Amino acid sequence: MSNNKQISAAFPFESKFQEVLDSKMHYVDEGDKNSKDTFLLIHGNPTSSYLWRNIIPHVSALGRVVVPDLIGMGKSDKPDIDYTFEDHITYLDAFIENLGLKNIILVIQDWGSALGFNYANQHRENIKGIVFFEAMSQVSYWKNTTKETETLFKKFRDPAEGHEMIVKNNFFIEAMLPMMAGRELTQEEMDHYRAPYLEEKSRKPLLMWPGQISFDGVPKFTTDIVNSYNEYHKNSDVPKLLFYAEPGLIINRELGEHIAETWKNITAVDLGEGKHFLQESHPHEIGEGIVDWYKNILNK
């Protein structure tokens, strides 16, 4: 699947800030604020609301669109916390509650998917639909990863090597993001992504995320949460939309087709060739796909 529309580097959205616990979380709030439906777009590591810039205009025609920066990321405050998965759950839950978001349609990727899937499992009455891609739909096992991925992520999870790569060398921004974008990012785009992490001390959230991934049951906190929400979502009647690409990083075509065949009430779209940050390589296909799904499935 391809789309010839231009991919813009611009982020022409008004910044807003919400008091959450002891800090302020940055977000954008587009579309009709009085809409009965709220699209909540949640990013992961090492990105921010900027990742969704070319998808927001498509979705904002359908209803309210709220796009936060996770705590410690993007333009959100950087409190002195551990930045564990549990911390992010606490801050995101409080963000949603403080804004009074209801009838939520999640649009989630990377760690945003784990946070979103968990929220939907814990607040089932508040979810109208889920759109996901390159998502943590199930626990991971080293045996199912490529040798390159296993070697890389074991380095991330090693205290000394992880600190050198992620904090000292800013690996996630300078190497992982360009490598997994699926196209060459421009200087302007890279500068947007670099901006929150210019100082080493600002990179703590980026350092912490890889160690929170469940590989072979470790850590247990993540494993228990992922197993719980996987069991719920694959059997729930909540309408779901999956985008997948080949080779991807988390969900390749083989896994995408398996999810499409085994999860209830799911629509699946094969985007063709793509890596991890599909918002950068296929934003218009994703945006238009959400619009079609919303009109034909959620609002038929």
Image (cartoon, rainbow, N blue to C red):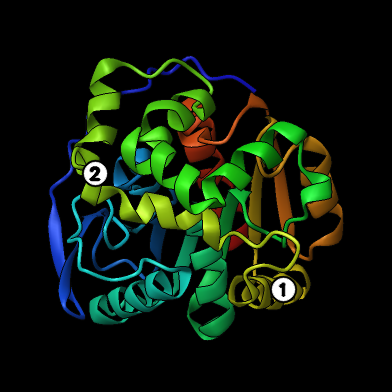
Q: Residues within 10 Å of mark 1 (few under 14, many from 20)?
A: some
Whether residue 178 can be seen here: yes
Tell me the kind of residue under disc 1: Asn
Q: Is residue 57 above or below residue 208?
A: above
Quadrant the N terminus occupies: top right
Question: Spatial distance from mark 1 to mark 2, Cα to Cα?
Answer: 34 Å
Give the quarter of the image for residue 10. Answer: top left
Q: Secondary structure at mark 1?
A: helix
| Residue located at (53% from left, 34% from top) | 278
Specify whether 230 is left or right of 280: right
| Residue located at (82% from left, 46% from top) | 144
Tell me the kind of residue under disc 2: Glu
Count of picture labels: 2
Q: Residue 63 at x, y = what percent?
A: 35, 58
Q: Kindly give the residue lying farthest to the front in the view shown.
A: 160
Whether residue 299 can be seen here: no
Q: Residues within 10 Å of mark 2 (few under 14, many from 20)?
A: few
Quadrant the C terminus occupies: bottom right
Residue 187's disc number: none
Q: Residue 185 at x, y = what percent?
A: 38, 19
Residue at mark 1: 227
Specify whether 17 is left or right of 73: left
Q: Nearer the viewer, residue 37 or 23?
A: 23
Residue 200's disc number: 2
Q: Residue 197 at x, y = what percent?
A: 24, 42
Q: Secondary structure at mark 2?
A: helix
Q: Is residue 293 above or below residue 270?
A: below
Q: Are marks 1 and 2 in contact (CB under 8 Å)?
A: no
